[in-house]
Amino acid sequence: KIEHYEIPYSAIVEHKADRTNPHVHSSLIFEKNGEKYVRWIIHPEDTRWYKDVEKYLIEKNIPYERKSHFTGHLQASRSLVLTDPDTNVSFSLKTSTNQTGGAWKDKKQYWQDAKEIREVMDYVATVRKNGPITHSAILMDEPMAVGIEELDMGMVVRSLDGIDGTGKRYLPGFSALHEKVGKRIALKNGFDDPIEFWKKFYAAPLGIALAELAATTGLTYDSPHGQNFLIELDANERPTGKVVLRDLGDVYGTKKIFSETSLSSRIPDFSGTIQEQMYVGFGPLHGNKHPSWVTFENYSDLTSTMLESFRKRFIEVTGIHPDNIPTFNANAGIGFSYRSFSITVKESDDWVLYLNAVDCFSGATTSKSGENCAELLKKIMPEKTPQFNNKNGCSDLMIALLNAS
């Protein structure tokens, strides 16, 4: 049972997208005796931040009740999966807690951060709807947030639409490199070497997904560790080739793509870091202990697979010739943490053509150069998009790789 404060709606602020599941919305914001209330969730492990909320409500003479309604489960990241017993709807929620684990010691959910998460997610969702992001990526939507402005504290809702009820399993990236779990799944799929398995079915598909995100939005992850990625498996623990991306509020913007086109106007209050070059990183074990079957050398192989997959797919989506993306600055990192590279693109005709097309990825009908978007996208994008049309929901590439094993 998860406890909450039942607070008058007038005491909080809300930031919500139209696509928010109405059952999720009514689970958190509801009417009682003709008045609206919010269920402000108390994290079951928190020993600090809920006290600030209670103190604030008392000082402001805001009436509240402490109740329980949801059943919940803790995720490794310390976000919650909540289920409303009245409707049986489930969703994920980020709320403040000072008790975490691993490399993360305290997680206050700031309201300013919650608002930016919402704006970034609306922007990415627009591109997802209109642009050439393939089925290699499943975006975990964050369509709603509520906050107490004076405390700079918020709660962020993560939708489970497209995940809950699919019959699939979703393996956290950290668990793929778990001593027992990662090895067991690899062996079950016919691979004696778990590193080779996860290179093909985690690192490579992730590179595709992140490249499509970067090429169409100008955004890359600030914290690309295993907590932010889920690997989709079927009921028999067979990889589908799809990867779930979550926590898109924690991103970098690439200046040339994001700031020097009209994309930045879609997130006018973006306060994330804007970088001259495109930063791409991967830290599948960042903040965690490594299993016995992962060495420094094959950890480097795993991260290199993702980075090479990223570069290849970025070239395919943008239409930029490989010779015009010459810089590949690898950062070996320290231990089992992040490995990264930066991409510097030469000024060229195909680079300019791609930048002209950036507006098209967000649903425009004409590019900034005045060309028809449908025709322009045909010019820059060859037909190299992975297909996911067989009955198992797996990509043809993934089926071929698994059968070959």
Image (tube, grey):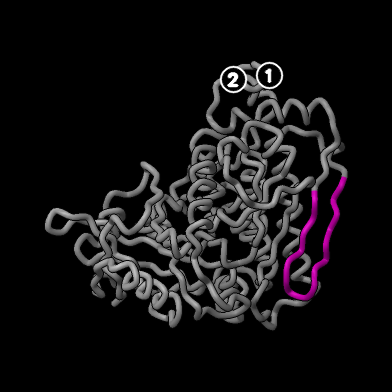
Task: Measure how far apart labels 2 and 1 are at the Cα level.
Answer: 8 Å
- Does residue 210 show up magenta in the picture? no
Image location of residue 335, percent across then percent down? 78, 75
Front residue of 291/152: it is: 152
Q: In this figure, which residue is indicated by the disc labeled 1? A: 369
Front residue of 145/49: it is: 49
Q: Which mark is residue 379?
A: none
Say what amino acid the circle numbered 1 marks: Ser
Say what amino acid the circle numbered 2 marks: Thr
Q: Using residue 162 as the reference point, say whether residue 279 is left or right of it.
A: right
Q: Which residues are magenta?
A: 327-342
In this orientation, does residue 121 appear?
A: yes
The residue located at (59%, 28%) in the rendering is: 360
Label pair 2/1, CB-CB below 8 angstroms: no
Quarter of the figure that contains the N terminus: bottom left
Image location of residue 84, percent across then percent down? 26, 64
Q: Using residue 81 as the reference point, say whether residue 139 is left or right of it.
A: right
Q: Secondary structure at mark 2?
A: loop
Q: In this figure, which residue is indicated by the disc labeled 2? A: 366
Q: Main secondary structure of the magenta part?
A: loop
